[in-house]
């Protein structure tokens, strides 16, 4: 394989992987605290993409403003989902919240169909992100391909700083292990849960925006497959672990892109790799790569 | 008699319904016939997923995958060779497939079997996982199945799908299949085997202690459920006449999940009602997507609105009526009519249980150090010690929940160290738990009947057709009679049809003992039988424990904190403190043993005047 | 009103489903006291202390806390645990409940969650380290790597970090070697001498009675005896409560 082609694949894998990672972080934070698979998370990601589409393309706002508005809008949606559909079910059996999550996912997708119509809409990419940079050895790179992983790594770095260096972060790490004891320390559990939803949604919004730029279009069901794959990435990296989610996402991205790059005949099976990877890890290391064993009491 | 009356009513209903189906084409147009068909097919799918999830408690998100297998198997068998050779455009069909052909009914059965076979393959590795992980893994398998179908063009015609499948699914076909599935499900669930399934769902640990191989039961229920999934998928394909891989996405599983949640998880009636409601609702809601004219105002149809309303309704059901329409209740003719009870046990060897140098370590921590104990037939022995002494750990080692790190445990002369709980139970040992572990959703009688499962002689599959295999009815009747007898002896007969969780606390304790006795043990372990009882209740309990020993010829080992109970009821007492066996003797010896006093009241207490 | 009162409980009842774990328990704690609640396993001691903390649903005629900070009586019945911490109550729970994946220092910081005075928190961490020098050696280690005794120290230290007026300790001697038991009780005395009121739940009756100003003996959910620590130490009925007379 030529160097240029390989670099292209590498950058592609890095971009895709870091996008999966950003979405996976939201799954892992919520699951770590509530043991809830937030099926609606992929759709929150979709909302982020639509918001930026409307802000910049329909309402012609500058990109910087559009991106900020989209992140704020998506975060509010994420918080609303928790408040309306999950909070009333905190004391209920876990399955109830799970069904509620499936319901919310349906709702958001179809609401998007109603409001935005089901038609895919093209996203106009800012030219500055698309102008290739050429290197002397023939390698050509598009700035977007660099921007995506850089933004993703910076955000996950910031999140880790928040988790490990601030008080709310400390509370969030404590809650994921023992809600009652954390409450005994004076922590308002619901606020911390809301914070987890808010942060997760904001990261999903950023991922959605970058996804819309990369595959330049938006449509109501665009969150479904990346959502499920990001969840797999979270399980693969070890559910509950933020660095794990990012690593899981990257591995998934590389497996998908590289398998097709090296074995083009397998391209039809691309989506199956994620699931195979998932089943393997569940069978041989159910806690994932970096996961700690969750308490399991008789 | 009540059951005869109910049988007659059921037969009348079935005949009336068959007449209705016969006449239906005369007054229902194609559209309504199709909805009726869909209701029946959805009901089959819902029943089969309910068996896996609602009744046996395995969270599976893989149903769509099994439906897909069923649909493709059936379609490949009923399509004519001419149709097949015309349809495979991109790649040629495998030659052997071209000429395979089978009648529709045979194809349905093979569709179910194929799905069940794949279900079994999935179940064996995946059912070791629990909870959400099981859900995710099954979802993963369903997606893999779909992706394989998309890519294996010579077998499945790939993403183009199959068209022109003969519309063999008539009203009689779909409702007939539903009738058979319903009959088998109801019979199985009513038999003691059904009780076992629910027991696995409610409390797997307690079920193991009843001698049930829970893994086997789960694999079985999963495989049966997959059969239903395949059957439903096949009927669906022959109704819609076109199938392609996109039909079997995760949304399909969600739809079925919604039906059983709306109807009530674990309720057969609920699945039927749920599929009726959800199917018709989805159809009826189409009006919001069509233009409407009200008072000359034109309201254009809004695409997507149907699913918006539907998903909102679902969220509301979950938040405000989480148990669904039926909860776990079932339909019975009895609701239309105003309302209106046998001995044998065995035994004898000198030493019943012998522990030699038993050690138990968790990681580096030592839970039990060198426990030696000999319990003779007919004795009531107490195991006491302060909090964290290792008493429950000792129980768990004896009953097989933990494997001892070293040492031997002999029960009735045979070594049982390291056997699983169900094997230990089968050897004649039974226990109760500190925090009562009843199958709370089952009736008192059913709880006791599950205890008899280890002596059940009929095979599980016979319970599907009890009218053919009358042993099922006979044996279940016997088990029922014995269970009633047991309840009678323990003074619980009045509660027989009550839900176990609705019993007063003292009665729940006794029921747990009754359930333990139903396995006909020779040795009974009681973990804190007096916990949570008031002084008067514990007084009664003491008499009760002695009576148990006498009437059932038992040997009993009990953990208890209520010293009054221990000192009064036990012949002999062992004392543990922080995993160390510090004393043994008669109640009088124990009471004045300085080590014991120290363990309980703190160092120095035995010399101090508190002693 | 008696200014020295801190916590007054009248007819406290706690039920778990069909189990009536605490029946009509009344007790009173005065400022500066060590009060102990003793009794055999399953007598309902933990339920009492957990209901004071707001961790279990309870019924009572009265449950009033008077904070020395403002002398205002506040009913704490039915309030969530986090509100109690802000009022000045903290609990070192049974089984220590150390967060195993957080370091010693992070556990202590969590105890100070309601406070914002960075300097004060740092001082208090040093204070806890002075009480338990071994914790200082292990400040960067994860909670799960500590021994049982060290975890107990950390639990007590963590409960002190919110600067509580009422410190509640649930079974601080559980599972500890005798020599450590003495150490823990020594420290309880020290903390009390520095002006904190303590409610101590203990199975180790002898040790608890020796340090307590006042004691209540719980039997099957109700108070069967009460008196000063010294009185009960000489009362043969205490032993009966444990060993069934």
Image (spheres, coloured by chain):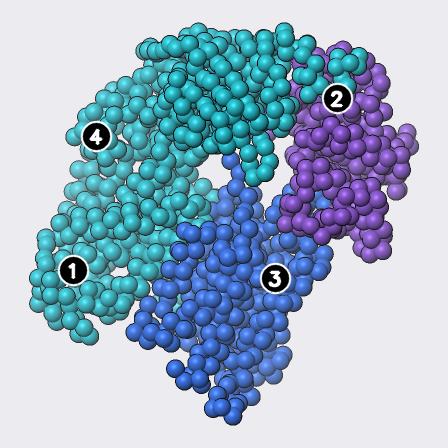
Would you identify the image quadrant in which residue B324 lies? top left
Please report, as a chain letter, where disc 3 is located: A
Check residue B76 in the rendering and tell me which mark sits there, or answer none. 1
Please report, as a chain letter, where disc 2 is located: B
Determine the secondary structure under disc 4: loop
Give the label, 1 or 3, closer to the camera.
1
Chain painted cyan: B
**Residue A190 horizontal side relative to residue B179, left or right:** right
State if disc 4 and disc 1 touch (CB < 8 Å): no
State if disc 1 and disc 2 touch (CB < 8 Å): no
Q: Which residue is mark 3?
A: A198
State if disc 4 and disc 3 touch (CB < 8 Å): no
* Mark-to-mark CA distance, 1 and 3: 50 Å
**Residue B609 horizontal side relative to residue A63, left or right:** right
Please report, as a chain letter, where disc 1 is located: B
Q: Quadrant of the C terminus of chain B?
A: top right
* Mark-to-mark CA distance, 2 and 1: 80 Å
Residue B102 image offset from top left, x and y in percent: 10, 54
**Residue B15 horizontal side relative to residue C48, left or right:** left
Residue B124 image offset from top left, x and y in percent: 33, 46
Q: Are marks 1 and 4 on the same chain?
A: yes
Question: In this view of the protein, can residue B51 be seen by the observer?
Answer: no
Check residue B603 in the rendering and tell me which mark sits there, or answer none. 2
Chain painted purple: C
Residue at image point 17% right, 42% down: B18
Q: Colour of chain A?
A: blue
């Amino acid at each position: 394989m030529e160097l240029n082609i390989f670099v292209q694949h590498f950058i592609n894998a890095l971009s895709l992987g870091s996008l999966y990672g950003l979405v996976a972080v939201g799954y892992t934070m919520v699951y770590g605290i509530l043991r809830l698979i937030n099926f609606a998370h992929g759709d929150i990601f979709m909302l982020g993409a639509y918001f930026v589409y409307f802000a910049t393309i329909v309402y012609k706002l500058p990109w910087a403003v559009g991106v900020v508005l989209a992140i704020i809008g998506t975060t509010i949606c994420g918080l609303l989902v928790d408040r309306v559909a999950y909070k009333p079910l905190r004391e209920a059996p876990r399955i109830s919240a799970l069904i509620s999550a499936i319901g919310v996912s349906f709702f958001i997708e179809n609401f998007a169909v109603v409001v935005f119509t089901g038609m895919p809409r093209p996203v106009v990419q800012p030219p500055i992100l698309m102008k290739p940079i050429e290197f002397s050895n023939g390698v050509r790179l598009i700035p977007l391909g660099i921007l995506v992983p850089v933004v993703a790594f910076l955000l996950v770095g910031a999140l880790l700083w928040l988790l490990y260096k601030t008080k709310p972060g400390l509370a969030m790490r404590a809650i994921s292990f023992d809600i009652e004891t954390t409450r005994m320390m004076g922590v308002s559990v619901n606020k911390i849960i809301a914070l987890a939803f808010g942060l997760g949604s904001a990261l999903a919004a950023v991922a959605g925006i970058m996804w819309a730029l990369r595959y330049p279009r938006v449509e109501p069901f665009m969150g479904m497959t990346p959502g499920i794959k990001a969840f797999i990435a979270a399980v693969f990296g070890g559910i509950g672990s933020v660095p794990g989610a990012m690593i899981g996402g990257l591995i998934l991205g590389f497996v998908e892109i590289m398998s097709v790059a090296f074995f083009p005949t397998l391209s039809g099976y691309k989506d199956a790799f994620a699931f195979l990877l998932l089943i393997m890890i569940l069978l041989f290391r159910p806690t994932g790569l970096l996961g700690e064993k969750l308490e399991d009491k008789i | 008699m009540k059951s005869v009356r109910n049988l007659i009513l059921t037969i009348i209903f079935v005949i009336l319904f068959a007449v209705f189906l016969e006449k239906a084409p005369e007054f229902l147009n194609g559209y309504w016939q199709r909805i009726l068909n869909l209701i029946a097919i959805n009901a089959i799918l819902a029943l089969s997923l309910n068996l896996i999830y609602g009744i046996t408690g395995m969270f599976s998100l893989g149903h769509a995958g099994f439906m897909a297998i069923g649909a493709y198997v059936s379609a490949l068998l009923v399509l004519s060779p001419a149709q097949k050779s015309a349809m495979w455009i991109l790649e040629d069909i495998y030659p052997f497939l071209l000429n395979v052909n089978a009648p529709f009914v045979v194809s349905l059965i093979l569709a179910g079997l194929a799905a069940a076979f794949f279900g079994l393959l999935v179940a064996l590795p995946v059912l070791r996982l629990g909870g959400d992980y099981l859900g995710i893994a099954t979802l993963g398998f369903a997606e893999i199945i779909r992706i394989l179908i998309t890519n294996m063009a010579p077998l499945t015609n790939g993403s183009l799908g199959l068209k022109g499948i003969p519309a063999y699914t008539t009203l009689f076909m779909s409702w007939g299949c539903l009738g058979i599935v319903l009959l088998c499900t109801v019979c199985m669930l009513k038999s003691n085997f059904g009780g076992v399934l629910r027991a696995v769902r409610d409390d797997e640990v307690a079920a193991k202690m009843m001698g049930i191989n829970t893994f086997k039961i789960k694999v079985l229920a999963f495989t049966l459920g997959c059969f239903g999934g395949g059957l439903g998928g096949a009927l669906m394909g022959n109704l819609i006449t076109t199938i392609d891989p996109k039909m079997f996405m995760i949304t399909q599983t969600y739809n079925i999940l919604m039906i059983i949640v709306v109807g009530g998880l674990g309720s057969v009636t609920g699945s039927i009602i749920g599929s009726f409601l959800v199917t018709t609702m989805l159809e009826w809601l189409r009006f919001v997507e069509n233009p409407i004219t009200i008072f000359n105002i034109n309201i254009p149809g809004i695409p997507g609105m149907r699913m918006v309303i539907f998903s909102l309704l679902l969220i509301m059901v979950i938040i405000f009526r989480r148990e669904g329409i039926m909860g776990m209740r079932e339909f019975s003719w009895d609701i239309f009519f105003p309302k209106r009870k046998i001995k044998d046990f065995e035994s004898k060897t000198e030493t019943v249980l012998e522990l030699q140098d038993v050690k138990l370590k968790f990681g580096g921590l030592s839970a039990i150090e060198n426990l030696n104990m000999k319990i003779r037939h007919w004795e009531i022995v107490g195991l006491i010690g302060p909090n964290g002494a290792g008493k429950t750990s000792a129980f768990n080692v004896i009953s097989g929940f933990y494997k001892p790190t070293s040492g031997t445990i002999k029960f009735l002369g045979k070594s049982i160290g390291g056997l699983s709980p169900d094997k230990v139970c089968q050897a004649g040992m039974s226990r109760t738990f500190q925090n009562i572990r009843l199958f709370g959703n089952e009736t008192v009688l059913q709880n006791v009947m599950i205890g008899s499962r280890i002596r059940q002689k009929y095979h599980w599959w016979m319970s599907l057709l009890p009218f053919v295999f009358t042993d099922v009815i006979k044996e279940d009747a016997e088990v029922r009679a014995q269970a009633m007898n047991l309840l009678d002896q323990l003074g619980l007969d009045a509660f027989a049809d009550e839900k176990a969780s609705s019993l007063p606390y003292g009665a729940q304790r006794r029921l747990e003992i009754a359930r333990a006795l139903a396995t006909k043990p020779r040795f009974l372990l009681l973990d804190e039988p007096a916990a949570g009882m008031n002084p008067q209740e514990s007084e009664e309990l003491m008499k009760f424990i002695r009576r148990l020993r006498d009437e059932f010829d038992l040997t009993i080992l009990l953990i208890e904190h209520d010293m009054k109970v221990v000192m009064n009821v036990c012949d002999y007492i062992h004392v543990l403190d922080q995993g160390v066996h510090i004393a043994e003797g008669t109640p009088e010896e124990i009471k004045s043993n300085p080590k014991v006093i120290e363990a309980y009241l703190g160092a120095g207490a035995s010399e101090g005047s508190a002693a | 009103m008696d200014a020295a009162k801190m916590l007054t409980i009248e007819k406290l009842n706690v039920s778990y489903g069909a189990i009536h774990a605490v029946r009509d328990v009344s007790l009173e704690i005065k400022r500066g006291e060590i009060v102990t609640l003793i009794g055999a396993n399953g007598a309902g001691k933990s339920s009492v202390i957990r209901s004071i903390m707001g961790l279990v649903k309870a019924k009572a005629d009265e449950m009033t806390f008077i904070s020395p900070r403002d002398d205002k009586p506040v009913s704490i019945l039915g309030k969530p645990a986090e509100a109690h911490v802000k009022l000045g109550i903290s609990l070192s729970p049974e089984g220590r409940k150390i967060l195993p994946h957080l370091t010693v220092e992070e556990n202590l910081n969590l105890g100070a969650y309601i406070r914002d005075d960075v300097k004060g928190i740092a001082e208090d961490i040093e204070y806890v380290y002075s009480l338990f020098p071994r914790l200082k050696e292990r400040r960067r280690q994860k909670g799960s790597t500590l021994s049982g005794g060290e975890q107990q120290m950390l639990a007590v230290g963590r409960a002190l970090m919110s600067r509580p007026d009422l410190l509640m300790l649930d079974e601080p001697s559980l599972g500890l070697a005798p020599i450590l038991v003495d150490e823990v009780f020594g420290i309880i005395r020290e903390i009390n001498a520095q002006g904190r009121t303590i409610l101590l739940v203990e199975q180790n009756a002898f040790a608890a009675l020796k340090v307590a100003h006042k004691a209540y003996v719980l039997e099957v959910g109700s108070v069967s005896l009460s008196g000063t620590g010294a009185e009960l130490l000489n009362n043969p009925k205490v032993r009966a409560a444990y060993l069934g007379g």
